[in-house]
């Protein structure tokens, strides 16, 4: 089988970029902008997963409203949230991306993070000898299948764009050649530095709550290695009910929609029931990236098990109560309060997060995930790295 021939730096290259959800699109927004600004790069935007599902807000419309052209829509999710449905989605994604790559073969494929849908384009690209660049490898989240997916994507990829120095070191320790591994920072932080974020009035209009009292922002997702992936959310909602009963009912609570992992329906149902009985609580199906980052600047604390609490909270800074084991193993800044999925300990952690002394202690903390300039670094690397036999033919430093 003949390897790909060299593509000189002066030749325009096609970089296919895959996004599967509102979360990774928020991370890729400024990367897409930077790639599009480079005359030697042609971006091919490939959209899959929750973006194409009405129950998750049909967020492909947000992408188009931002001015991006969607070149390929790859349907893969089914109608249920079971483990079997997730496995089937990977298969559908592999077939769909294989057809798309056959129609128009990119020079390079860019993937991000650890969603199960990302295995589909990675499988197809690997079989078709298309080199893969991967953002956010080398991290850990031991309570979810994401951890294994992220490591699998790392071993399938040819260029590694890590958020932290420790993640870079881990990938090199896995046997990847050092020249392939670049510490760039988390591209989600670019929004905090570069995006025009809404003020409180615009947020209140979008969310439908008075935010004069800073709200709790709750972002909780299934723990996909548990037999019942939604089980830890029971303790969260018990703690929130206790929070309301102790006189905190005037503080708004904004719930983000859980992601498309198996178990999400139960979490959604609990959030809907909580909001139905608390007029000062809202479940938002989809917050556009600038709205989400803007809201983070106005909240009292972030509560749940989202990676956002780990990666972005320190750059504002705000307290983040990290519940349970979904994010176990991740490198954490000082604003994160780790607690087990127990109602009493969650309640105590929320109280600590709302303590003015704790909030005050966070001023000047350093975010290990970067400085808000990741997109430029990523675009420079992907626009200039030689695409040749050396890139595709991986060896090992071990």
Image: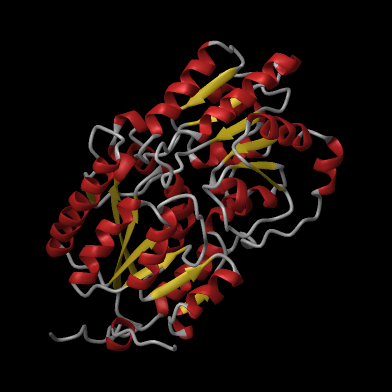
Counting every numbered tag in the picture gives 0
Image quarter where the C terminus lies is bottom left
Residue lying at the far front of the rendered structure: 227
Which one is nearer the viewer's eye here, 318 or 200? 318
Which one is nearer the viewer's eye here, 58 or 42? 58
Q: Is residue 349 visible?
A: yes
Quarter-of-image position of residue 43: bottom left
Which one is nearer the viewer's eye here, 229 or 139? 229
Residue 66 falls left or right of residue 360 = left
> In the picture shown, does residue 19 fall above or below 366?
above
Residue 18 falls left or right of residue 38 = left
Q: Position of residue 69 (x, y in %)?
A: 30, 49
Q: Position of residue 100 (x, y in %)?
A: 17, 58
The residue lying at 53 percent from left, 58 percent from top is: 187
> In the picture shown, does residue 335 fall above or below 347?
below
Image quarter where the N terminus lies is bottom left
Q: Position of residue 322 (x, y in %)?
A: 62, 43
The coloring applied to the image is secondary structure
> In the picture shown, does residue 143 fall above or below 39?
above
Residue 300 falls left or right of residue 152 = right
The residue lying at 82 percent from left, 35 percent from top is: 355
Q: Position of residue 303 (x, y in %)?
A: 62, 36
Residue 193 falls left or right of residue 386 = right
Q: Is residue 197 visible?
A: no
């Amino acid at each position: 089988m003949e390897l790909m021939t060299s593509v000189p730096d002066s030749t325009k290259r096609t970089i296919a970029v895959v996004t599967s959800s509102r979360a990774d699109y928020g991370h890729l927004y400024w990367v897409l902008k930077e790639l599009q600004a480079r005359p030697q790069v042609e971006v091919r935007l490939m959209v899959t997963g929750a973006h194409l599902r009405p129950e998750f807000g049909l967020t492909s419309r947000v992408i188009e409203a931002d001015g991006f052209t969607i070149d390929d829509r790859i349907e893969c999710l089914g109608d249920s949230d079971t483990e079997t449905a997730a496995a089937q989605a990977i298969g559908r994604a592999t077939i769909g991306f294989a057809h798309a790559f056959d129609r128009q073969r990119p020079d390079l494929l860019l993937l991000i993070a650890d969603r199960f849908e990302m295995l589909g384009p990675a499988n197809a690209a690997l079989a078709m000898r298309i080199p893969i660049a991967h953002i956010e490898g080398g991290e850990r989240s031991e309570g979810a299948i994401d951890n294994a997916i992220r490591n699998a994507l790392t071993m399938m990829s040819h260029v590694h764009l890590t958020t932290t120095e420790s993640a870079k070191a881990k990938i090199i320790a896995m046997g990847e050649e050092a020249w392939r591994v670049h510490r760039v920072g988390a591209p989600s932080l670019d929004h905090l530095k570069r995006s025009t974020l809404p003020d409180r009035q615009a947020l209140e209009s979008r969310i439908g709550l008075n935010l004069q009292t800073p709200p709790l922002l709750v972002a909780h997702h299934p723990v996909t290695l548990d037999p019942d992936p939604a089980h830890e959310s029971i303790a969260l909602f018990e703690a929130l009910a206790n929070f309301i009963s102790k006189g905190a009912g005037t503080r708004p609570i904004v719930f983000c929609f859980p992601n498309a992992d198996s178990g999400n329906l139960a979490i959604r149902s609990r959030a809907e029931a909580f909001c139905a009985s608390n007029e000062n609580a809202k479940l938002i199906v989809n917050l556009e990236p600038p709205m989400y980052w803007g809201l983070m600047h106005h909240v009292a604390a972030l509560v749940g098990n989202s990676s956002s609490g780990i990666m972005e909270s320190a750059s504002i800074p705000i307290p983040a109560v990290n519940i349970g084991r979904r994010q176990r193993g991740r490198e954490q800044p000082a604003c994160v309060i780790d607690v087990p999925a127990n109602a009493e300990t969650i309640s105590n952690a929320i109280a600590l997060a709302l303590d003015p002394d704790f909030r005050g202690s966070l001023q000047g903390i350093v975010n290990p995930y970067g400085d808000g300039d990741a997109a430029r670094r990523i675009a420079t690397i992907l626009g200039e790295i030689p695409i040749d036999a050396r890139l595709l033919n991986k060896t090992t430093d071990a």
